[in-house]
Image (cartoon, rainbow, N blue to C red):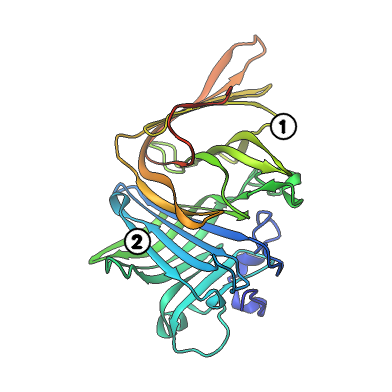
Amino acid sequence: MIFADFPNSFWPESQLDPQQTPHSGYHWDGISERFFEGWYYRVTLPEDRQTFAFMYSIEDPIGDRPYSLSGAQILGPDDEYLYRRFPDVGQFWAAPDRLGLGHWGTTDLTSSPTFLEASLFDRHVGEGYQGTATWHQGNLQDPETGDRCRWQYAIQPVYGWGDSDGIQQSTAGWLSFLPIFEPGWQILMAHGLATGWIEWGDRRYEFTDAPAYGEKNWGRSFPEKWFWLNCNYFEGEPDLALTAGGGKREVIGWTESVALVGIHYRGQFYEFVPWNSRVEWTIEPWGCWQMSATNDRFLVELTGTTDRPGTPLRAPTHQGFVFACRDTMHGQLNLQLKEKRSSGEWQTILSASSTVCGLEVGGGPWDQTWCSDR
């Protein structure tokens, strides 16, 4: 079963929140042409200075295409990597009207895959995963390395993509509802609180109210070239989340370079996007990410750096699911947010830093620094 359709009673109550972010549901409509959709869950453990990032993808779900595949990747402690490939896309499921997905890799059940109560999942799914807006669990093993990860945690969403008391927004604006841009991108949860446990090999991590994050993308392939910065744990600022990124994307036959910065801070959403701000960037092939964005009221400046080598990750491309990007969850980030006063001067209203920022570059070529003016 590709589309999961089952009673609402199976879902955590908050899944039915009318203020869920747009594009939370599965986008595939049954067409046979090239298609992928990917989901990203992350938990940061401040006391351990470690982060777990879970990445799921489905490609060519019809099942008889050259690149048909369901995959799961995990970026674990110290940027260690686990990958599990599931060739049988028929064991993947996703909900069309809300955030919900999973894959039964090995199971003794003969029914179509769908969301299961946690204890039933543990009992009947030997390997696989499932996730919603408020729940995430799984058990995966990398067949090449033998590395294993098990996890189970509840999620309390705090910020979607917009003001905390307002209607949630599409990350790419209202045009994202039309088949104009490739790929689509949506921040599902800019910040949340996770409580539960993760086992990585022989080590068990238990946590309460750990910073959590979620996003997704969909289309025919990832952008030609892109970069990304993300962090929702800052020293001394428990109510702060940042997502920023940019790329060369397809727009009905041509490409354009665009970028955005989104900040959630003390209940307010600061959005810097091409239609309301000037967004600039200078991104080195690896090691330094610099961005600035300005509108009539606010100015934001970001600098992300790392001395770690990063970990190669797979991504959907026109050549299938292959290594196409590099990530670290141990970036250093400095953030400055300023507001324009009546005098015309900029006054700093937020200065924050972190040592557990997610940093990424992808696509290419990355043989020289990428600046927004060229």
Front tag of 2 and 1:
2
The residue wearing badge 1 is 275
What amino acid is at disc 1? Trp
Q: Which mark is residue 347?
A: none
Q: Badge 2 is on which residue?
A: 82
Q: Residues within 10 Å of mark 2 (few under 14, many from 20)?
A: many
Is residue 192 left or right of 83 when viewed as pictured? right
Place residue 106 in its image quadrant: bottom left
Q: Is residue 125 visible?
A: yes
Please determine whether, in this image, residue 50 is positioned above or below residue 336.
below
Q: Residue at x 56, y 88 (%)?
A: 111
Q: Which residue is painted at 41% across and 85% down in the image?
A: 123
Callout 2: helix, strand or loop? strand
Relative to 284, is 186 on the left or the right?
right
- What is the C-alpha distance between the residues marked 2 and 1? 39 Å
Which quadrant of the rendered structure holds the N terminus? bottom right
Mark 1, secondary structure of its residue? loop
Residue 130 image position (x, y, % from top left) = 50, 70
Compared to residue 10, the image places residue 219 above or below, namely above
User: Could you tell me if residue 303 is visible in this image?
Assistant: no
Q: Residue placed at 62% from the left, 34% from the top?
A: 258
**Residue drawn at x 45%, y 34% as measured from the top left:** 366
The image shows residue 23 at horizontal and vertical percentages of 67, 56
Say above or below: 53 vs 300: below
Q: Nearer the viewer, residue 109 or 365?
A: 365
Q: Name the amino acid type tagged 2.
A: Leu
x%, y% of residue 343?
65, 9
